[in-house]
Amino acid sequence: MNKGYKIVCICLTALLLVALLAVFAAGCGSKATTTTSAGTGTTGSGTTAAAPTGEAIVIGAIVSATGPNSALGLQERNVLQMMETSINAAGGVLGRPLKLVIEDDTSDAQAAVTAANKLIDQDKAVALIAATGSASTVAVKAITATKGLPQMAMAAANEITDKAPMDWIWRTPQKDSMAAARALTYISGTLKLKKIAVLHDENAFGTSGATEIANTASKYGLEIVATESYKTADTDLTAQLTKIKGANPEAIVVWGTNPGPALAAKNMKQLGMTIPYIGSHGIANATFIKLAGDAAEGVVFPAGKLLVPASITDAAQKKVTDDFIAAYKAAYNGDSPNTFAGYAFEAVDLLVNAIKTAGKTDPAAIQAALNGTQGFVGPDGVYNYSATNHDGLTADDMIMVKIQGGTWVLAE
């Protein structure tokens, strides 16, 4: 291949990426009304979209790019960076550039607090996307509530939107009660089982899920015969699993995010435990498969439909999802986005839509616009917020996913 040909190929690849990002930015969310032509800044009407000018609109974001939650936070950070580029390529927000200032909380709640104060006081963010983990999200929630600033959460613990203060926080993923309901319905309705064991992380996410399961299992005709917990940094769970094995459950529910759930799968295989493994939506990423190896085969868990796009029957949601996946793959060397990437996309998309709807960056106006958001389509479902419902999605937006042949397929 000659040098000139290589240059042409590189240029074409770059143009393709710009085209995908521009189309993606113009078409994301159900509120989008214009289509931007690839790489040219022209709308479907033939007019040229003006480049954003003036003072940037700053949205702060806190993700766990390092630490135990990095399997979730790294893709979230990727999406945030991609969205800033694509939105500005499509004209920005209210004609102004969008600036996403991203901080890494290292999977630590106190670090998230420090980051939130910096983003609000120094960077002058008009809203926050925070955070990857439930503990960090709850810690930041106290700050945004006090300062009256909108916060989009990407974490699932019930207390994020169930426990006061709630006026300034909205979430993109399904909360634990919805995921637990989906998992327990699968165990009782599809598997026709009665006795379960619960193994959970002692962190905010794991504890929230375990509490939800304990409070609702009987509603599904299920009996919990054993409950064990582990610390996020534990490197061996055979002691807990040996106790569970002795209780003779018919299935085990493991609630946590990596690495714990992957370690549980490996230790179960070592102990010869062949009962069904039902995970939480916290393992909806390729890292779980990588860490668990062969032990991941057959694991089932609830997740948003993004993980298995073929499961989406709504045409509008399918288009948003397909565009998002194409843009992410183009930006990140063909890698596929996971569920958590979707949460980050929806957090930006919903906030930007609210700012556009409000026509200004006043926090109270953004709050009102978010509370009025209805029928907003994202890869993980259709969002409907109100002044009293800041969850957006329902359990019906989730599917049960099975790991088969090293990838994800529908479990039912």
Image (tube, rainbow, N blue to C red):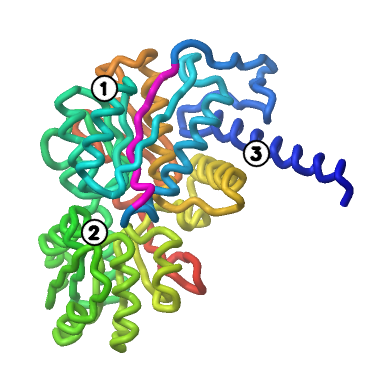
Q: Residues within 10 Å of mark 2 (few under 14, many from 20)?
A: many
Tell me the amino acid under the disc marked 1: Asp
How far from the left and from the top, in percent, is residue 212? 15, 58
Q: Which mark is residue 17?
A: 3
**Mark 1, residue position:** 121
Q: Residue at x 34, y 47 (%)?
A: 64
Residues in magenta? Answer: 56-66
How far from the left and from the top, in percent, is residue 182? 28, 60
Closer-to-camera residue (152/318): 152
Q: Does residue 237 appear to the left or right of 51 in the view shown?
A: left
How far from the left and from the top, in percent, is residue 29? 46, 33
**Does the CB distance between marks 2 and 3 fall below 8 Å?**
no
Tell me the amino acid under the disc marked 2: Ala
Q: Does residue 27 appear to the left or right of 361 in the view shown?
A: right
Tell me the amino acid under the disc marked 3: Leu
**Mark 2, residue position:** 181
How far from the left and from the top, in percent, is residue 404? 47, 73
Vertical comparison of 311 with 150: above or below? below
Q: Residues within 10 Å of mark 1 (few under 14, many from 20)?
A: few
